Image (spheres, rainbow, N blue to C red):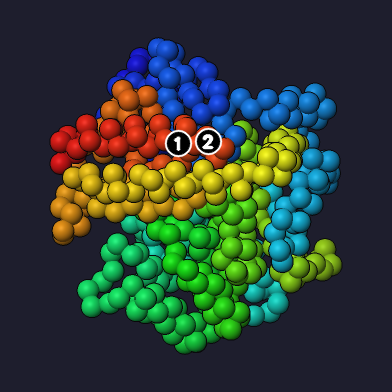
Amino acid sequence: MKKNSFVWHPNTQMKEWSSFDTIVKAKGMWLTTSNGIHLLDGVGSMWCNVWGHSKPELVNAIMSQSKKVQHSSMFNLTNEPAEKLAKNLIKLSPGMHRVFYSDNGSSAMEIAFKIALQYRKNVGDKNKTKIATLKNGYHGDTFGAMAVGYVPEFFGKFKKQLFPTIQFPVPNGYRIPKGYSFLDYQNFCLDKIETEFSKDGKISTFVMESGAQVAGGVIIFPKEFQKKISNLCKKYDVLLVLDEIATGFGRLGSMIQYTEQKCTPDIVAYGKMLTGGYLTMAATLTSKKIYDSFLGEFNDHRHLFHGHTFTGNPIAAGVANENLRLYQKNNLIDKIQKTSKIFKGYYNEILKLDIVGDIRHKGMLMGIEMVKDKKKKTPINSKVSINKILFEVGKKNGIYLRTLGNIVMLVPPLAISEKELDLLLSRTIDTIKSAQNKLL
Ligand SMILES: Cc1ncc(COP(=O)(O)O)c(C=O)c1O
């Protein structure tokens, strides 16, 4: 470890990393290290970058708002950019009525759970107290988020401290249990949900990522799966909370993923791409029904007891407004759908690699699952970190990769050009090829 660094890095075995490359410049899709190495950003600054780095319009939005109001809290006050952004978000999000701001995705989800659970109290429903969710979902690293998005490998050490949730299986086309067709297994999962919903009426809320599970292994939901869950929620009076933090705003090829999935949540959370990936901001949106249940006399104490220092930060909101303007001006969603086709051209080449078992792709997201044995589908399970090996080899090939378990994740900035995406994919293939002996 570099002697002069005091930083503890996220999700990192610090003993394994003797030093970290320092990014000193970032422009377009490229990051430059202090050693002059140029890396094509395959991670999109942890899945949040929209336009690439140093986009002049976004930089200007930050600068111009910085000159007016840098921060003034939402406690007793409001600010223009946050008001404008809330209006913009409501316009984009069918069925939504109010926006509660926070500054990261985990908090946005915690807020969603608190709102959903308190809603039941507000309407005097004592029976509905449980939260249900899908196995392998991920909603952040704080305690509530860990309880609901419980990924055993990440959070097993805290299991005893986490509040209980009911978890249902997820259909993953690559790992269908023996004896089922993919469709049968989807129906099996949905039946399980319906059986539990209809049992004793105790389920208050169903929480899921919208469109796909990302951190849980890039599991893209089959057509209609989410819609059918949404229908079950309506049928059994269960609130639907959707997490669009990683999958909304074009990542999967639609601005608002739940409109593509044809379902109507009661609560939805956005984060990551909201500010183009430049500043930290997230938002939890609710329907009118939910919002109205919090209204009452002061003494009723039914308002939402939640608030963060940087809630509704005007600089973050200002850059988010500019980001949304650019989505429209540049028809970004159409562009993503076109550029995304580049991934398809590489399916065969990637699948031919010795250690690749499956690829899962939608929009600007691709997961490449690496296995020891293609027939048995045994995940590779190296004693050293797979991520570190691939990162180092990727660096030599001029790309920045961050691998999750045995899944290589490609999550580039949304506006990446076709040429740069071609480069990212061909260099990823070279990287997996060069690393495979070390990985097995
Ligand atoms: C689906 C989903 N929800 C929530 C979060 C948590 O967001 P944050 O890292 O901003 O707390 C993430 C982060 O990757 C995510 O992928």
Q: Pointers 2 and 1 in contact (CB under 8 A)? A: yes
Distance, label 2 to label 1, CA atoms, is 6 Å
Type of residue at label 2? Ile
Quadrant of residue 428 in the image? top left
Q: Residue furthest bottom?
A: 199
66 in relation to 225, above or below:
above
Question: Residue at the location (49% across, 36% down)?
Answer: 418
Query: Pointer 2: what residue?
Result: 416
Q: Is mark 2 within 8 Å of ligand 1?
A: no
Residue 94 left/right relative to 265: right
Whichever of callouts 2 and 1 sits on the residue coming sooner in the sequence is 2
Closer to us: 347 or 277: 347
User: What numbered label is drawn on residue 421?
Assistant: 1
Quadrant of residue 152 in the image? bottom left
Question: Residue at the location (75% across, 56% down)?
Answer: 90
| Residue 334 seen by the camera | yes
Closer to us: 415 or 91: 415
Type of residue at label 1? Leu
Q: How many marks?
A: 2
Q: Residue furthest front?
A: 345
67 in relation to 136, above or below:
above
Residue 281 left/right relative to 15: right
